[in-house]
Amino acid sequence: MLLCGSVICCLCHIIIAALIGSFYQNWPAHTAGGWAGVAFIFIYMVAFGTSWGPIAWAMPSEVFPSSIRAKGVAISATVNWLSNFLVGLITPPLNDAAPFGAFAFYAVMTFLSFVWTYLFVPETKGRSLEDMDAVFGDSTASEESESRQRIAQSLLDVRKVEEVEGVPWSS
C-alpha cells in the first residue's frame, strides 16, 4: 500500500510541477491546465490519505513489541506532527524560489519514500504481533504466548488429574 501510494503521490507531484512550470506565467489563458492541477491535487490527497497519512498511527501499533508499543506510537505521532510543521514551514519559501519548486522537491521526497519503503519496511499484512516481533528480532510477544500456552496446558493437566482422582471440577 505504501509503495503504491508513493508512486501515485510522486506522479501527481511531477505532473503538477510540470503544469505549473508550463503555465504559471499566464494561468487565465490556460484554465484547463489549472483544473488539471486541481484534479491531480485531489488524486494526491486520496493517495496520501489512504497510504502515508494514517501510517504514523497504524504501523507502530503493528511493529513495536508490546513492551514499548505505547512509547513507539507516541514517538511516531510526535515525528508526524513535527513533519507536518516542517512541510508548512518550508513550502512557502520553496514556492517563492521557483513556482513549481515545492512540487519538484516533494516529488523527489516521495520517490525516496518509495525506495526506503521497498528496502526497509516489512510487509505486515496477515502477520501476527508475534510474527512482527520475530521480524525485528524481539521475542517478548512469542514468550508471552508460549507462557499462556503453558499455563493453559497446566490447567488442563490439573483438571484431568482431579477428574481421575474422583474430585469434581468446580469453577
Image (cartoon, grey):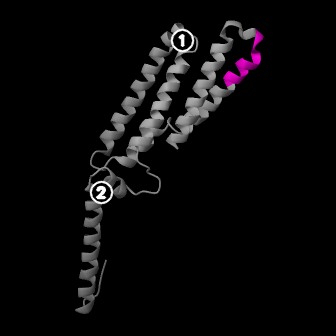
Provide residue 138's location: percent of width, then percent of height: 26, 52
**How far is mark 1 from mark 2, CA to CA?**
48 Å
101 drawn magenta = no
Q: Is residue 95 left or right of residue 18?
A: left
Q: Which residues are magenta?
A: 29-38
Provide residue 103's location: percent of width, then percent of height: 55, 20
For the point 29% across and 84% down, which residue is it? 169
Secondary structure of residue under mark 1:
helix
For the point 23% across and 87% down, which residue is it? 161
Q: Which residue is mark 2?
A: 141
Tag 2 or tag 1, which sits nearer the N-term? 1
Classify 156 as above or below 119.
Answer: below
Classify 51 as above or below 132.
Answer: above
Bin the neighbour count of mark 1 within 10 Å (Cα to Cα): few under 14, some 14-19, many 20 and up.
few
For the point 63% across and 14% down, which residue is it? 21
Numbered mark located on residue 163 in the image = none
Provide residue 164's location: percent of width, then percent of height: 25, 92
Residue 23 can be seen, yes or no: yes
Bin the neighbour count of mark 2 within 10 Å (Cα to Cα): few under 14, some 14-19, many 20 and up.
some
- Name the one closer to the observer, 114 or 80: 114
Labels 1 and 2 touching (C-beta < 8 A): no
Q: Which residue is mark 1?
A: 95
Residue 56 can be seen, yes or no: no
The quadrant holding residue 115 is: top left
37 drawn magenta = yes
Q: Main secondary structure of the magenta part?
A: helix
Tell me which amino acid carries mark 2: Ala
- Name the one closer to the observer, 47 or 161: 47
Q: Is residue 86 left or right of residue 154?
A: right
Tell me which amino acid carries mark 1: Asn
For the point 40% across and 43% down, which residue is it? 121
